[in-house]
Image (cartoon, helix red, strand yellow):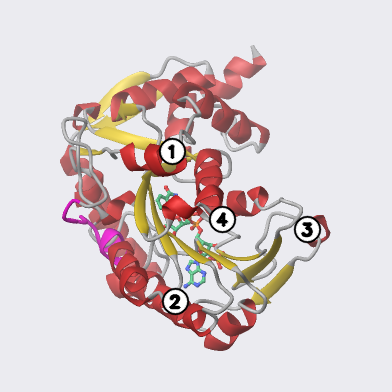
Amino acid sequence: MRVLLTGASGFVGSHLWDGLTAPDCEVTLLLRNPDNRHRATQSSPGLRVVRGGLADGGALREALEEVTHVLHCAGATKALRPAGLMAANQQGTRNLVQAVNERRDRIERFVLISSLAAGHPATSVSPAREDDPSDPQSAYGRSKLAAESEVREGCLVPWTILRPAAVYGPRDTEFLPLFQAAARGLAPVFGGGKQELSLVHVKDLAETTLTALTHPDARGDTINVASPEIVTARDLALGIGAALGTRPRPVSLPWWLLESVCMAQTVWSRCTGRPTILGNGKFRELSAPGWVADTTRLRERLGDLCRTPLEAGLQQTAAWYRKEGRLKPGSADSRAKQA
Ligand SMILES: NC(=O)c1ccc[n+]([C@@H]2O[C@H](COP(=O)([O-])OP(=O)(O)OC[C@H]3O[C@@H](n4cnc5c(N)ncnc54)[C@H](OP(=O)(O)O)[C@@H]3O)[C@@H](O)[C@H]2O)c1
């Protein structure tokens, strides 16, 4: 088989690429900047790299040569304006689906990495199921839902849509500020930290995605991908401290402060032309009572693949940040190490 992977230069995509190591599996990467990749070319026999983005029809067609399976992981998580998210996530997916349809005689599966944000907020009382009516809270969530529709309504080859919960693990940058705060002895939480979250370790997500790529029971389905563990924001912040060997002090911050930060970041982002993840209505998403996924379908279709316990996953993540020198000098973490 030959797999086209988009988004290999990103956090999740890099782990998907790491997992594509079966002897009968060759890989094609579609990359806007081929220098943005974490593995050396020579480590993957048969590797093809095609330069281009999702708006480049010629590059998409070139990238699909000899391809039998498509893993569409590329996606924008931030943009200056909602239209930028739609362009990357909806229109980009539409372009790829159209190019895939031209090769439908050869392509056996199309997997889209969507997001739990395309669904609706939910707590442990009634976790979000895949067939519930969607109610995305941010422009990002709406763009991922629109990408899903492109696949459901337009894709002529067997497809699978995966909806990962918040992803953490080595190479992630979004959870890094929480680790850095915990390393300084602080566990900042908003609104008392009662928000309930599903999470998925990136290696579990990669294993699940690669299983879904060929699994007959994943055809034509939308599947949440999350660990069965549910954690409150407060316990997550304290768990990160424990993974670092610190006992951070919980600091409860008001929601209005986060809203102000999101507004300020939006203004700053538009002035500087540098996109922020906190823009485009992200506050509503971040302040929802919970993002808890029902994982019954995942277990029924693909098995018990999201097995990494949160404690172990946070320890692995902390170890990676330390190795990479991402926990700044002068922090409680580095002082503990010196002691
Ligand atoms: N991280 C999470 O918690 C999470 C949760 C649920 C779902 N997801 C989904 O998982 C996927 C990967 O997310 P991530 O966290 O790994 O993000 P990331 O680190 O920002 O990586 C995004 C990847 O998408 C590529 N990309 C973005 N816009 C593109 C475009 N217009 N054309 C071509 N490539 C484009 C980037 O390429 P460049 O290097 O060229 O910029 C990069 O390879 C996304 O689809 C995201 O929606 C992530």
* Label whose residue precedes the other's in the sequence (3 or 2): 3
Q: In this view, does 113 lie to the left or right of 7?
A: left
Q: Foreground mark, 3 or 4?
A: 3
Q: In which quarter of the image is residue 91?
A: bottom left
Which residues fall within the magenta stretch? 132-143
x and y percent of residue 319 in the render? 61, 28
Circle 3 residue? 44
Instruction: Name the residue at the bottom extreme.
Output: 58
Q: What residue type is labelled 3?
A: Ser
Q: Mark 4 points at which residue?
A: 13
Quote the CA–CA distance across marks 1 and 2: 27 Å
Q: Which residue is drawn at 25% across and 45% down?
A: 286
Based on the picture, tell me whether residue 228 belongs to the magenta stretch. Answer: no
Q: Where is residue 254 in the image (x, y as percent from the top left)?
A: 18, 35
Name which of mark 4 and mark 1 comes first in the sequence. 4
Q: Are marks 3 and 1 in contact (CB under 8 Å)?
A: no
- Tell me which label, 3 or 4, sits earlier in the chain: 4
**Picture coordinates of residue 34, whole percent (x, y):** 68, 69
Find numbered disc 3 in the image and state the secondary structure of the residue it sits on.
loop
CB of residue at label 4: within 8 Å of ligand 1? yes
Q: Which residue is drawn at 23% across and 49% down?
A: 285
Question: Tag 2: Cα neighbours inside 10 Å, few (<14), some, or many (≥20)?
Answer: many
Residue denoted by label 1 = 200
Q: Is mark 1 within 8 Å of ligand 1?
A: yes
